[in-house]
Amino acid sequence: MDAVQIIATGKALPKKLVTNDDMSKIVDTSDEWISTRTGIRQRHFCDGEKNWELACQAAKHALEKGGIEKEQIGAVIVGTATPDYIMPSMACIIQEELGLPEDIPAFDINAACSGFIYALRVAGSLLQEEARPYALVLGSEQLSTRTDMTDRSTCVLFGDGAGAVIIKRNTEKKFYGVWGTVGNRASLGCPGHVMGDPYIYMDGQTVFRFATQYMSNAVKQVLEKAELTLEDVDYVVCHQANERIIEYVRKQFKAPAEKFFKNIGKYGNTSAASIPIALTEMDEQGLLEPGKKVVIVGFGAGFTWGSMLLEF
Ligand code: ACO
């Protein structure tokens, strides 16, 4: 498979900003507990906005930044575990709202927090066959609607937001990526209304162990496939679930702090949206000039995991 090349990024956050001090008025917690255990200082929560509205904003942002015509989009895939509707999919709503072509596939992927990485890989493989040159890939989440705001062990961790990228095939480079599944519904999940429990449950320490082990291994495997070392890579962008998880992975590689991009302090864990939001911020900070190599890596409920090399 040819490499996936990102040519534009975009993001959207709900207007409502909720600090750790705000959370401490809802549950028995503190800025000190949250920030030292997770690195999170604030997050955005939807207050009337729909998940699909955030997704459309992020998609428009990426299309405008990239100067991409709608007719050039050959597929829309959204990584999300928190769609507004069971059906139609978020991707179908984006196709309608943005007036994208009718002869293209548009669908969602639920791989929880790994959803964006899964969506990117699937979109890359679809582009091998599509006549149109680009795909629109998103991670878009509204975790606040699935979080029990009386459960301090989960409600302080999550935030809402959307990130979007426009990708094309790079026929001069090969694709390097890994992904996988280690089914474990006991440790992390969200039953939903049909199952009689709308909220996320989590065994934090089991998730922590899974995340550190599988993210470290995934980065190693991608580097081996690409015959690179971490020194050859400019940045690693981990799913922003917890600063301590990211630091654990960084220390496995004895890498300098600046190589592992972090913005969890501002947004909390936005699940599938965290990597495309991070890429958008990196782009805005001028970190993603042509030629830069970035490894993205994530894990999620399932458990799912995945990583890939991106060259800008
Ligand atoms: N404020 C204050 N105290 C709290 C809070 C809170 N928000 N939450 C839990 N506590 C208390 C607990 O009640 C417990 O008290 P006790 O000892 O009196 O029983 C104490 O803090 C320790 O609780 P632990 O759960 O053992 O805390 P731990 O050190 O494991 O940290 C954390 C919890 C931060 C959730 C950690 O386990 C973690 O980061 N896990 C990974 C979570 C994660 O990344 N999930 C991903 C979610 S989905 C996804 O992205 C795929």
Image (cartoon, rainbow, N blue to C red):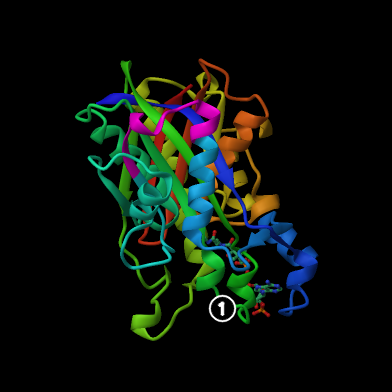
Give the quadrant of ligand 1: bottom right
Which region is colored magenta? 63-76
Left or right? Give the position of 247 relative to 110: right
Does the numbered disc 1 mark a residue whose Cβ is under 8 Å from ligand 1? no
Nearer to me, 297 or 162 = 162
* Residue most extreme to the left: 129
Q: Is residue 68 magenta?
A: yes
* Residue most extreme to the bottom: 196
Say few, some or many: other residues with alpha carbon within 10 Å of mark 1 (under 14 / 14 to 19 / 20 or more).
some
User: Residue 56, how many percent across, how many down?
Assistant: 48, 49
Nearer to me, 133 or 157 = 133
Q: Is residue 202 above or below residue 311?
A: below
User: Residue 107, how many percent across, how many down?
Assistant: 30, 51
User: Residue 112, how many percent across, how many down?
Assistant: 41, 58
Q: Is residue 2 above or below residue 20?
A: above
Residue drawn at the location 70% of the way across and 51% of the way down: 266
User: Residue 39, how many percent across, how many down?
Assistant: 69, 54
Residue drawn at the location 51% of the way across and 56% of the way down: 53
Q: Secondary structure at mark 1?
A: loop
Give the residue type at disc 1: Asp
Residue drawn at the location 41% of the way across and 61% of the way down: 81
Left or right? Give the position of 295 relative to 25: left
Name the residue that disc number 1 marks: 148
**The quadrant where residue 118 appears:** top left
